[in-house]
Each structure stands twice: as C-alpha cells, then as structure tokens.
Image: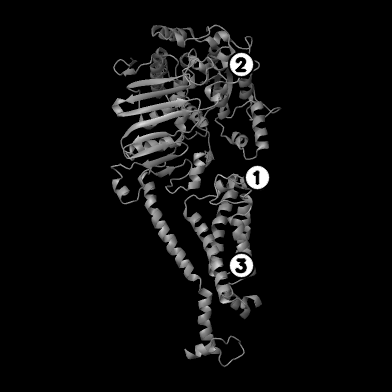
Amino acid sequence: MNLINRYSKPQLFSLVALRVVIGWYFLYEGLAKLFSPNWTSYGYLMDSAGIFAPFFKELGLSGTMIQIADNINIYGLIAIGLCLILGSFTKIASLLALAFLSMYYLSHPPLIGAQYILRPEGSYLWVDKNAVIFFAIVVLLFFPTSRLIGLDRYIYKLKERN
Amino acid sequence: MSDDINNRKDTAPDNEKNRPVKKHSESRRDALKTLATLPVLGAMGYGVYKKKKNEENHRIASQLFHFDEKQTILPVQPEGEQIRLGIIGFGIRGSQLLQAIGFATPTYVEDLKETSRKNPSNTRYQDFLDQDSVNVVINGVCDIFETYAKNASAAGANINREGLNGKYGKAPKIYKHYKELLAAPDIDAVIIATPDHWHGTMIMDAAKAGKHIYAEKPLTWTVPETYLVKEAIENSNIVFQLGHQGRQIEIYKRARDIIEKGQIGKVSLIETSTNRNDPNGAWVYPIHEDANPSTIDWAQFEGPEERVKEYMDYMNDHGLEKYIGPESRDKFSLERFFRWRCWWDYSTGLSGDLLTHEYDAMNQIFDLGIPTSATSSGGVYFFKDGRTVPDVLQTTFEFADKDLTMLYTATQANQYNRSRKIMGHDATMELGSALTITIDGASTQYKDKIDSGIIKPGEPFYRYIPGRSVDALTSATEMYFAERGLLFSYVKGKRYNTTFLHIREWLECIRQGVQPSCGIKESFEEAITAHMGTRAYLEGKTKYWDKEKKEIV
C-alpha cells in the first residue's frame, strides 16, 4: 500500500491505462473466438514449433482435450479481460494472463528459422508480442492499481471490514 | 456540498463526529474510483455490436449459398452379410484399393508404424487401424507378376492389420489366370485394377460369371469394346462401380446444389487441369527387382486378342502407325510392364488416366453426358523417354445442348496448382479442397448487392470447407489451412479416405441391391468422352458424337 499511495497522478493514470488496454486486448480476443462459429485452436496448435511442439500437437489431435483447451482459452481470455478492465481480482487475473502468454510463446517461439503457416503480423527475433505483453503484465503485478481505481477498492474494503 | 469539499482530504477514520458526512462524500468518490473503468466495457459493447453488424452484411453469403444438409454416405447395414472378394491386379492401385478397406501387407504396416514412430504427427498408422471394417473376406487374388500375387495374398490374409510376425487369417488363394479366379465359387465380387487394355474384357468376363465388379477407371481401352461392356453389364444382375472415388467428394455435391439453384448464373465455361512434375506423376514407376521373364506371365500381359485387334485396326485404318509400339508386342520389356501407361499399346494416356477424373467430377455436378465434340492438341514435350502418349495435352469438349465448353489442360512437367473453375454469368466457383465463390463484377443477379457495397466483386465472397459447418466468415487462417490441405474431411466427425467411401458404397449397394454412384451409365459416358479426346489427339481433328447413331464420327 505504501507504494500505491506514492503514485503521482500521471503515474497512476498511465498504469491504469496500461491495465485497461491489456484487458481490452484479452477481452476482445476472447469475444471474437466466442462469436466465430466453430472456432477451434486446432490449426494454431498444429502449427506449433520448438521443443514443446509435440506436446501442443498432441493436444490438438486429442478430441476431448482440444475442446477443453478451446473453452479454457475462450472463457479464460474473457475473464482476464474483464478483471483487468474492471480492476477486480487483478492479481489472480494477471497471473493467469502470464500463464496464457507463456503457452502462446512456447507453442510459437519466434526462433531463428521457425516457419509458421500462421504468419505473425510483424517481424520478430526471440522477442515477440507475447513476450512484450508478458512483461507489461509483470509491471502491473508489481505496480498494482486496482485498489485505487477499480472494483478491488470495494472488494478490499469489504475484506477489511470483515 | 461545502462540507464535502472541506472533508475531502480527510480520510482518517479517527473523527467520529464527521463520519456520516464523510461517508457520504467518500462513498461517492469511492464509487467513482471503483467504477471509473466501467465505461470501457460500454465502449467494448458498442464496438462489438458495430463490428458484428458489419459482419452481418457478409453473412448474407451464407444465406445466399445455402444448401441442405444431407446424409452424404450410404448407411451401413448393421447385420449385413460378409462379402467374399477377389482382386485382379495388385500393382500400385490394386494395393491402394485393398489398403483403403483395411488389408495391407505386413511390410506396409511396418512402414506405417515406423513412419509414425519417427514422426508422431503423422497419423496414417492410427488412421489405418481406426478405419471402419467393411465386413469382407478376401478369398482369391490374381496378378501376373508372382511377387505382386504373393503380396496380394499376404495383404488378404492380414485380417488384423498387423505388421511382421503378427497373427494372420487364412491366406487367399493365388490364381495364375483371372479366368480361374472368376470361376471360383467362393468369390461374390471382384476388384479389377489391371492396366487399361484389360479393363473391358475382364469386366465382361466377370459380369458373365455373375460377380459384382469394382473396376478401376477408365472403363475401356478401345471404342468398340465400350459398347460391349455396356451391354454386358446391362444384361447382368451385378452391381457395377467404376473407380472414380471423386464421386464421394462432398464438395462436388455442394457445388451441384449451388449451381442447380442458379446461384452462380448461367455457366458457359468450365476449366479443369492436371499439373504434375515428377517422374512418378509421369508414370515412370519403379521397376521391381524380382521382375524377369520367369516371374512375369508376359503372354497374359500382351492383352486380349479381340481388343488388340480392335486397337490395331483403328490405328492402321487411320494411318496412325507411328503411335503403335515402337517395340513389338510379344517382346518382353520391364519398362513396358511397369510403365505401361506411357504407351498407347496398353494405355489411354492422360485422357483415360486423369482427364476422366476431371470429367467425371463435372458430369457429377452438371449431368453433362457425352460431349457434342472434342478437340485436342499436345505432344511428348518433356519426357522424351520413348513414350508414345503425350505428356502435355489440351482437350476442349463442347456441350452444345448445355451451351457450355469444358476445357481440360494438362502438363506432367509443372505442378503449379490451377484450380477447377466453373464460370457462370454471376459468379465463378473454384473447386479444390475448399469451394470458393467469387461474384462477377458484371453480375445481373447480384447487381443490387454490388451497388450497395455488400458484395465486393472480384474478391472471394463465399467459402465452404468440407467437414465444417456453413460459415461465410471463414477466417484467413482456416482458408490457409484448407488450401494447404491441412484440414481433413470428416463425415460425422470421422476422417475418411474417398477411396474407402467409394468401395464401401459399392459393397453396401451389393448388400442392399441398389445402384452405386458411378454405375454403367456414368462409366459409358466417361469412356466415350475420354475416347473422343484421345481420337481427336491421335487423328489431329475434331471428333463429333453422333447422337442418333451413338457413334464417334
């Protein structure tokens, strides 16, 4: 709490803005998948590369596991997005987001010579969009804002009162 | 309000007196800070709504190109009787046909196992094991090359789909001559996968012997035998299926639905092609090390006497001696035995081998029937290995009563992927592993939608990928996968091979006493069409179909 109380207004504003835009990004990724009929992570998983590729491909080929993975993806993304935007349970949401991003990174590592059918929209070497967002969320974890701006403010008050 | 302002900075809970006022102001500010980011969700909601509305316009595509969900494969009778099969010809295609219904040599199964061990993402071994049983037993096999005959017998005995040192069933009997196999009482139905020059004769003999027939395409090698085969099948009670497994491709059924509803407008031109660029694709097949005059029954390979006479008569009557041979028919030749497709002496060339698949696909979609005329050109331009059949061929078929042209264009020395295009006044339909429709900028039917911006002419507007439900909003990703053939075809959630489905249809038709999708009518049309193309090439002039006399003139 000490650190939180010492945020200047521009610091607080930029941290909240970062939290909200990352939340937006996750929420819309989830909604877009939810709304596209028959969306499945099959293609993405089958296009994996790197040392973990066999694991992701096996996941893609297994009938039941892929359904579970798809649902975790869709609803996980939506939940993370809502939590970050609204500022509720942001710590858990951030940790979950880090787990998701790790999976995306490990299944499609931007290695030298890695060729993906689903081409990334940019040019990457070792560091990709997932890695950048990962560390942005690490920043959010150590510079929390939801108890100042967000539902956590109310949630923690309730906690304190009890 | 002034109290609020005064107390704004005081957040310490020590001043009990001020608490009610403070609580009021604090709670308002608290609420503001708590819910400050809530409007973001409103913005997201608005954005998603706008985006979905925008996509609705595109979704019109799925309404435009709607088709009924039909059962696309004949259901298997749960208590169907076992069919006793014989196979004649166990070369490349013959072994593929048996593999498709679950019978492969132990060596082949070992290879599959090895491949999947090395590359776990290769699922062919598992697919082979998982393939439905078609409830058949292989009782007889025949091949004039000893090694192939032994392989066929080993495949037929491999009832548990095992590798080496497995538990096998009773080995099917090996027949030296196909007529002995046809005479066997413990065989109900035969698969014929021999070189082209034997198809017709074997089909007729099998029909006379009362055996149901699954024969590889093309139906015949000479024109005169085509009529005889038709008559023989029509006068029999057998179930006949020609091996155009394309009949099982779901996408062609969808294409037919869409075209029948007039949704691409009047079709005037169909473009089909073959592009291959490797020796195997040009029929330069490997020569087996065991092959020699003592392991191959060359006399039987030469062909049926009457057919050879029909062939020689036609060639000589039309001054086409240069296409005969060049080697003498009775001279043993390993090249001619394994690469028989390269010589007219046994082959029907590109026309019979590959054009027939394209034609049959279009005949399935349009009920084309026999063309009014055929014109061909081409030559031996790349594989100058002594072959007589061309490796580049262009054939144009006119269907005057349908007001359309079907173009077939092939090269065996370039594998650029040219899609099948069905060109209508309102749209062009492309058929590959996906069905894609691009609306024509000058379309009459879609003028309103083009004018109002719903349809962007020239851009793919609708795409159907087999195994997935109708979806006009198919993502770029999915398209990519479909075009690279990475999306599999599923029937009710299970991946199938079209050859399996085609043989299975034939077997079910035998059990249920119904006619299969590529019966004698379709086969006769296929054969005559291919022969017209071939004759046009050989004679260097347009060949016509005389509807009255039912003759190629």
Residue at mark 1 shares a chain with residue at mark 3: yes
Residue visible at 55% across and 59% down in the picture: A77
| Front of the two marks 2 and 3 | 3
Which residue sits furthest right? B165
Task: Identify which residue, A161 or B272, lies in the foreground.
Answer: B272
Kindly check if marks 2 and 3 are in contact, taking CB atoms under 8 A apart as contact. no
Q: CA distance from mark 1 to mark 3?
A: 33 Å
Subunit that carries the residue with mark 3: A
Residue under circle 3? A140
Q: Is residue B272 found left or right of A100 in the rendered image?
A: left
* Left or right: residue B466 compared with residue A59: left
**Amino acid type shown at disc 1:** Pro
**Residue for badge 2:** B174
Disc 1 chain ID? A
Residue B391: percent from left, percent from top: 48, 21
* Amino acid on which the number 2 mark rests in the picture: Ile
Tell me the crowding category of disc 3: few under 14, some 14 to 19, or many 20 or more residues within 10 angstroms, Cα based: many
Q: CA distance from mark 2 to mark 3?
A: 76 Å
Which image quarter holds the C terminus of chain B?
top left
The chain containing the residue under callout 2 comes to B
Which numbered circle lies on residue A54? Answer: 1
